[in-house]
Amino acid sequence: MTPQLELPIEQLLRELTPQVLGTVVRRYHNFSAAEDAVQEASLAAAIQWPIEGLPANPRAWLIQVAIRRMTDHIRREVARRRRENEVAVSRDELANQPVAEEDDTLVLLFMCCHPVLTNASAIALTLRAVGGLTTAEIANAFLVPESTMAQRISRAKQNIKTSGIPFELPDKKERVKRLRSVLHVLYLIFNEGYTTSVGSELNRADLSQEAIRLARLLQGLQPDDTEAAGLLALMLLTDARRKARTNGEGELVPLEKQDRSLWDREQVTEGVALLSATLPKGAVGPYQLQAAIAAVHDEALHYEDTDWPQILALYELLKRMSDNPMITLNHAVAAAMVHGPIKGLELLEVLKEDTRLANHFRLNAVRAHLLELAGDREWAIEQYRIAGNKTGSLPERNYLLTQAARLSSEH
């Protein structure tokens, strides 16, 4: 039995679906129809495999089922359009065609980030096709309503269909043009895996591990790009803490209370080495700076040893490069750790006017934490409760409401 077959079916499907989609798109050059066919194949697998057992080659099984769905689609199109030049290929012929062994996920990644799409649409479509995120999860990552994101993804699919974008890895010059979008997609996929926005689990290791796998492929494809290396380092250094983020009951454990002996020191070493080799090469970008912040956290043997002044300095550099409100939020936390909670609360005020974050639970959660540090328990309790009732993540909700209950009992 191969290691792949030992994975839970849900995780196995998540890892194989982008690869299968890449193969079907390569063969039929119809992104939207191929995505529908692969989704149907995955649904069939989710129903049949637990009953009938895993096939000898799950990837080939999914490809063949998706091909059959595509054949049905072509036949329907032939019947509807009545065009003589559209001929459906028989199922038997397709079933006998060899299945390509190459992993087309990286090709699919670059295809979805084609310049014909707006940057936002390209990223949204790639998160859906490559990351397997739901529309609701993508909307959460972009801080927009789900209906807005659904329309954006639909338009992106239509643009892919009408533009005739070839399914092939672009040349080096063209890759450079699309690279920033590709990096951002992988960053968002990793973040959703590391801290899941909805559901009963704090993280989805399969999703973050797939992001790391693709980041490795991308860094190998673009070895001279410092931000590609920076992103991979950031993922490794962040994911190294995953096992310590929950206890035996699946409850969230904050950074200051984590058992650091559970941190993956091999990943920390690899991430630090990659970052150390990258920083001297040229201009420093946002991913390298975030990786440097993660490295400072990871290199502290105890929470009390954390070099907060260095982290604050790095966040100040990062704020100059990026208009991301989450960075502003984290900068406020770092400032509070250096200059006191009142300073952090002052810096949060600017975010009240930022529509991207004004209604996000993390703003209330951070405010609650800083209010607690400042001794304002009553308002901290209120903010913890507001934050807990806003989040779709059950572990985070439970943690935040527990903090509110703890302060109430101590009051």
Image (cartoon, grey):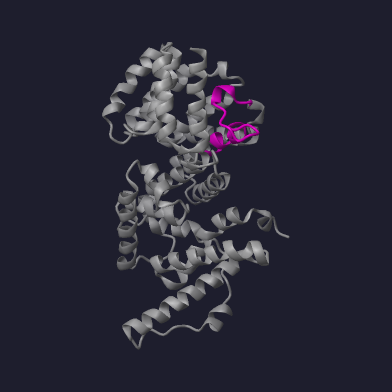
- Write down the quadrant of residue 313 in the picture: top left
- Say above or below: 216 vs 372: below
Q: As rendered, which of 410 and 194 lies closer to the eye?
A: 410
Q: As rendered, which of 38 and 393 lies closer to the eye?
A: 393
Q: Residue at x 65, y 33 (%)?
A: 248
Asked whether 244 falls inside the magenta stretch, the response is yes
Asked whether 407 falls inside the magenta stretch, the response is no
Q: How many marks?
A: 0
Q: Residue at x 35, y 48 (%)?
A: 146
Q: Residue furthest bottom?
A: 84
Q: As rendered, which of 114 and 381 lies closer to the eye?
A: 381
Q: Residue at x 66, y 64 (%)?
A: 51
Q: As rendered, which of 58 and 176 lies closer to the eye?
A: 58
Residue 74, percent from left and from top: 41, 78
Residue 335, percent from left and from top: 40, 18
> Is residue 171 among what the camera can see?
no
Q: Residue furthest right?
A: 1
- Say above or below: 31 vs 83: above
Instruction: Write down the region rendered in magenta.
Output: 235-259
Residue 362 falls left or right of residue 190: left
- Say above or below: 261 vs 309: below
Residue 321, percent from left and from top: 34, 32
Q: Residue at x 58, y 63 (%)?
A: 47
Residue 17, percent from left and from top: 52, 60
- Write down the quadrant of residue 32 in the picture: bottom left
- Say above or below: 27 vs 7: below
Q: Report the quarter where the N terminus lies.
A: bottom right
> Is residue 379 among what the camera can see?
yes
